[in-house]
Amino acid sequence: MSTGRVIGVIDPFTNGASGTALLPGSKSITNRAVLCAALATGRSTLDGVLFADDTDAMIEAVTALGAVVRVNRGKRRLVIDGVGGRQPESVGAARSAAGAPMKVHARSSGTTARFVLPVVAALGGRWLLDGDPQLRARPQDDLLAAQRSLGAKVRELGEHGCLPIEVSSARVDDAAAMLHHIRIRADASSQYASGMLLAGPLRGGIHVEIASEFDAVSRPYIDMTVAVMEAFGAIVTVLSENRFVVTEGSYRATDYVIEPDASAASYVWAAAAMCGGAVRVEGLGSRSIQGDVRFAEVLGEMGADVTVADDSISVGAPPSGTLHAGSFDLRDFSDTAQTLAAVAAFADGTTSIEGIGFIRRKETDRIGNTATELAKRGVDAEAEPDGITVRANSFGLRAGLVDCHGDHRMAMAMSLMGLRVAGIDIDDPDCVAKTFPDFFDVLEALRGSPELTSEAQVPVVAIDGPAASGKSSVARAVASELQMDYLDTGAMYRAVAWATLGAGVDVGDVAAVAKIARNADIAISSVSGTQQVTVDGADATAAIRSAEVDRSVSVVAANPQVRWVLTRRQRDWANRVGGGVMEGRDIGSVVFPDAVVKVFLTAAPAERARRRLAQQADSHDRAGEASHDDGAVAALAAELSERDRLDSGRADSPLRVAHRAVIVDTSELSQNEAVEIIAAMYRRAAGGEGSIRPRPLQGR
C-alpha cells in the first residue's frame, strides 16, 4: 500500500450507540422521484433529497433528457421543471445538428441506467448510455430484449448484454399509441420491471408482467415504484402479484417529501443492537414504502429491543445483553444482507442469510467477497449458492484491514465490526459516497457518553479474556499507564487452587473448595512494581503459576460458590482503592458490568501457545527454545482451545465477550501497542470523544 493512502480508521464504541440518527433521504425514492418529476408537466419540488453519487448520476441524466433542475444541497431540495413526457425541441435540434447520439453516463448507478434506458427508448431519437467499469459489468440482458420487442434498435458496444449501448427509436405517437404487453424477468433485479413501469406513461400505457417461473427479487422496490408513480399522477393498476397495467395518462408536477433511507438506517440500528444503547430514526415507521425497514424486525427476532411507531423506529440493545442467531430470508431487502452478516458475527449461534443469490451480480460479489472479508477477520463465514452462513465465535475475531472491493455497502457493514473490535480499518472509505456520503460522521454522532449508574460507582477498566492471552501483563501495564491500581483476579482463583491442592482436597469437591475460598487469607500486593501473592501468610507468587495449578484452576473457577466468594472480594477491593484495572474471566460481565471500559483481550490460539511456552522457557533460563517447537505449539494451542470451550460452556459465569466490551486482538500486537489501544479507549470513554473518519495512514 502506498504511503499516505486514505484508510477509514474506526475507534470502537465503549459506551454504546445512542441518539436520533440524522439520515439522508432514500436513494431509491430519490431516483424514482427525480425521474417522475423530470417527465412531468410543470414544476415539482422534492424535499429530503439524497445527494450522493448515485443520485447525482440521475440528476445529470434527466438534465440530458431536457429537464431543468435547480439544486439546493443545503436544504436537501430539488426544483425540477419537467419535459411533459416529450423531449424538448431544443434538445432534439442540438442532437441533430451535432449528428451524434445524446449521451447519458450513469456512473455506477444501476437505477439510473435501468430506469433511463426504457425512458429514452420511449422518448425516441438516438441515445448512448454508458457507465463506470463497475456498472458496465452488471447484466442488462432482459431489459435490452424488452426494448427491442417494443421496436427500439439496441446495439451493445462492448460485452453482450452490458453497457455501453446505443439506442435508436421513433418517438411514440400519442394518437397511434397502443397498450403493449411486456413480459420481463425480475430474478436478477427488480429494477428491470421498475424501469418498464416508469416509462409506461410515455407510451400511452403498458402492461408489465413479471415472469412467474422465475422468483422475483426485491419485490418491495416494485411496490415503491408504483407508489412514487402514483404520487406524480400516473395511473397504475395492480392486477395481481406479477401483473401491472399503466393506463393512458401522464405525470403531473407535485411537491414530494422523500423518506430517510431505510438501507442507511440498517447500519445505525445494527450499531445499537451490537454495541448497546438505543438509536431512533424518525421519518421511517409502519407506513414506510421501503421494504428495508423490515431489517428492524430481523434485529427484533435476534433479541434486540425494537419499537415501531407510525413515523419512527427505535432499536436498542437486547435486554438479555445477547443477540441470538437465526435463519433469515432477505430476498425482499437484500441491501441489508451485509449489515446482517456483520451483526451475526456477534450473535450466539449460527446465522443463515438466505434468498440473496442474485446479489453476486451487484457492485461486487456481495456473497463471496463478504464471506471472504469476514473470514479474514476471524469469522467462520461460508458463501452459499443462495446466501451466507455465519457461525459466531467472538474469541476468534481479528483486527486488520478490510478490502471493500469498491462496494459502499461492504465498507459500511464492515465498519460496524470496528465498533466492537479494535484495529479494524476500512480500505477505500470514500466509496460510501455512492449512497451515504456522511456515513462516518453520522455514525460518530451516535457515540455514547459514559454514564455512572450511581454516585458511588468507581471507575474500573475490566479486562477479560481466555487463558494465555496476556491479560495479566497487559493489565498491569495499562494500570501503570493510567496511574490506577491493578488487581489480577485470576491470581485469586489460582491461589484457591494452590491452597486446595496443598490441602489434599479434590478440586472437584464443590463444597470443600468453597470452604477453602471463604477461609483463606489471600493478599495481592505490588512490591517494587512486581505483584506478590500470599496465602495465609505464605508467599505463593511463583507456586500459583505451576503446571499443576494450570491444570486445576479452570475447575476451581467453574465452582459457583467460589466465584460468589471471590466476586465480592473483587468488588470490595475496587471500592476500597477507588477503582482500578481488573482482569479475569467475568469482570465485565459479572463483577463490574458497568465498568467504564470493558475489554476482551484475545489472540490466535497458536500465538497464545507460543507466548505461554516462551514464558515457561524463560522462567527456566531456556528462552526461545520451546516457543519455536511447532509440535509443542500445536499441542498447547489445542489444549488452550479446549480450555476455551470448557470455560465458555460452564453453567456459572461462562467466559464470554461482555455486553459493550471491545475485542482487542493482540495476535500481531506488541504489549506496548495493546496497552496504548486500551489506554486510549479509557481516555475516550472518560471524555466521550472518538473518531470514525477516513484519514491517511503512513506505510500501513
Image (tube, rainbow, N blue to C red):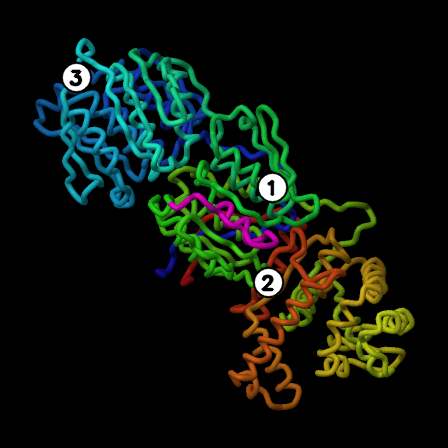
Of labels 1 and 2, earlier in sequence is 1
Along the line of sight, the residue nearer the viewer: 6 or 630: 630
Of labels 3 and 1, earlier in sequence is 3
- The residue that label 2 is drawn on is 395
Element type at mark 1:
helix
Of labels 3 and 2, earlier in sequence is 3
- The residue that label 3 is drawn on is 90
Q: Position of residue 478 (x, y in %)?
A: 67, 65
Please state which amino acid type lies under the numbered disc 3: Ser
- The residue that label 1 is drawn on is 301
The CA distance from mark 3 to mark 1 is: 56 Å
Left or right: where does residue 655 sit relative to residue 260? right
Element type at mark 2:
helix
The quarter holding residue 203 reads top left
Is 269 colored magenta in this rendering?
no
Element type at mark 3:
helix
Tag nearer the camera, 3 or 2: 2
- Residues in magenta, as a range: 339-357
Left or right: where does residue 617 sit relative to residue 112? right
Tag nearer the camera, 1 or 2: 1
Q: Position of residue 444 (x, y in %)?
A: 55, 43
- Vertical placement of 354 versus 94: above or below? below
Is 356 colored magenta in this rendering?
yes
**Residue at 14% in and 20% down:** 170
Please state which amino acid type lies under the numbered disc 2: Phe
